[in-house]
Each structure stands twice: as structure tokens, then as C-alpha cells.
Image (cartoon, rainbow, N blue to C red):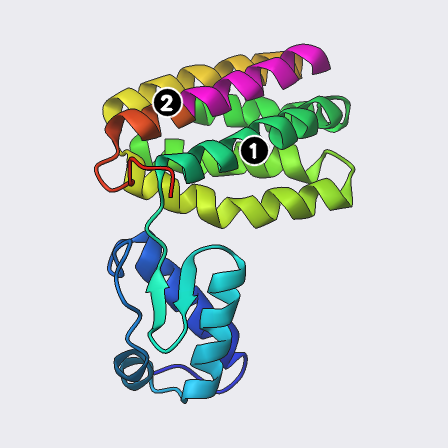
Amino acid sequence: MIKVESVSDKVYETLFEQIRNQNLPLGSRVKEEQIARDLGVSRTPLREAINRLARDGLVEIEPRKGARVKNFSVRDVNEVYDIRKALEGLAAGLATPNLDLQAVKDLRKTFRQKYPVLLAKADTELHQMIARNCGNSRLIGLLDQLNNLIQIFRVSGYDSPQRSEQATADHLKIIQAFLDRDAARAECLVREHVDNSRKLILQNSETLRKDNG
């Protein structure tokens, strides 16, 4: 049961996790009555959460039919990753002179340990570090807006040793550029990393639509 305070936010977080974990699969109907009953909430905060998910591009609301989890296409991935490549590359270049080098070295140690759980945590920390230190609040907001979609693509697109090895190699190169205070190289490497992530998603996805619709 969800507590009364911030009900809409809690419902949003719950539904997002269900989509990310594929308990609500791509293309599936969002059954409002059942979800409201399961979570012990009224329809009002539930609909507020669904409208927020729609604004974030995670669900589609169809007139007289209700909401459905968006069934993403190859084109969706390419559009989001084109934007991510440009924005996160820019952020990496801007962040390079601002980074705490000891924090970067600590992160490098984590990446070298090769444990999947630690690698996933370090992955998140590195990308958060880039955003936090870019010094541009509007850029941070845009990256944050993309983040939920990127998480969905990661889960639906791949979860493989190949992805882990490629991502770790990319991250260690990016970290070295940060330690060298080489902003241009860091920007270039982050853009290459985003392209590598995109390729693995598209190669390994069994859920993305292949059309452009």
C-alpha cells in the first residue's frame, strides 16, 4: 500500500519500475482499475502519474481506449541516441576541468574490479558525474529528461557480457581523458561510447519495432 503523501510521485515511480523491469511490457495496456486496486490508491493520482509518463514518452494515451506502454521502434532509439550523443558529449567536455580527480580515480578502481553489480553502479555514477559537473543547468535538465527513456532502452535492448565489456572499456578511456584534463578527447570518447551503446541495443533487441512508425 502507498502512503498518502506524494501519492502521484510514488505511483509514477512504481509504474516506471514496472515498465523498466518489463512487468508492464512494451505495448501492453495500462489497466487503471487493477493498478489502483493493487496500489491502494484512487484514480486521480494514478491518472496524474500516467499523464506524467505520457509526457516523458513512456506511455501513449489513446482516446476512449486508455493508456498503453509505448512500443518503441528502431527510429525511437536512433532519435534519442542522436540527442544523447550531442548533449552528453557536450557535457563531458564542459565537465572535464571541473571534475574532482580523486573521485575520478576512485571510479576507475571500481571499473577495474569487473563485478557486474559494481560496474552497473559505476556506470550510473560516471554519467551522473558528467552531468553534475558540466556547469549548465539547462543541459543537466535535458540529460535528466532523456534518462528514463535510456533506462528503458537498456533493459529492452541488451543485457550481455559483450555490452559489459564494451562499456567498461569505453568508460576507462573516458576516465583517462578526464584525468588528463583533455576536454576535447573526453567529448569525443563519450560520443563514441553513446554510439557503441546504441549499436548493441539495436543488435540485441528482440522487442523494438523494426518499422519507422
| Vertical position of residue 16 compared to residue 120: above or below | below
Q: Residue at x 71, y 15 (%)?
A: 183
The quadrant of the picture occupied by the N terminus is bottom left
Q: Name the residue carrying label 2.
A: 199
- How far from the left and from the top, in percent, is residue 102? 64, 25
- How far from the left and from the top, in percent, is residue 50? 45, 71
Q: Is mark 2 on a helix, strand or loop?
A: helix
Q: Which residue is drawn at 54% across and 61% down?
A: 55
**Magenta span:** 181-197
Question: Magenta span has 161?
Answer: no
Residue 195 can be seen, yes or no: yes
Along the horizontal axis of the image, is 129 left or right of 23? right
Q: Residue at x 52, y 57 (%)?
A: 56
- How far from the left and from the top, in percent, is residue 207? 24, 42
Q: Along the line of sight, which residue is nearer the eye, 192 or 31?
A: 31
> Label 1 sits on what residue type?
Arg
Q: Give the mark count.
A: 2
| Vertical position of residue 88 compared to residue 10: above or below | above
Residue lying farthest to the left in this orientation:
206
Along the horizontal axis of the image, is 107 left or right of 92? left
Question: Magenta span has 195?
Answer: yes
> Label 2 sits on what residue type?
Lys
**Which dot marks residue 84?**
1
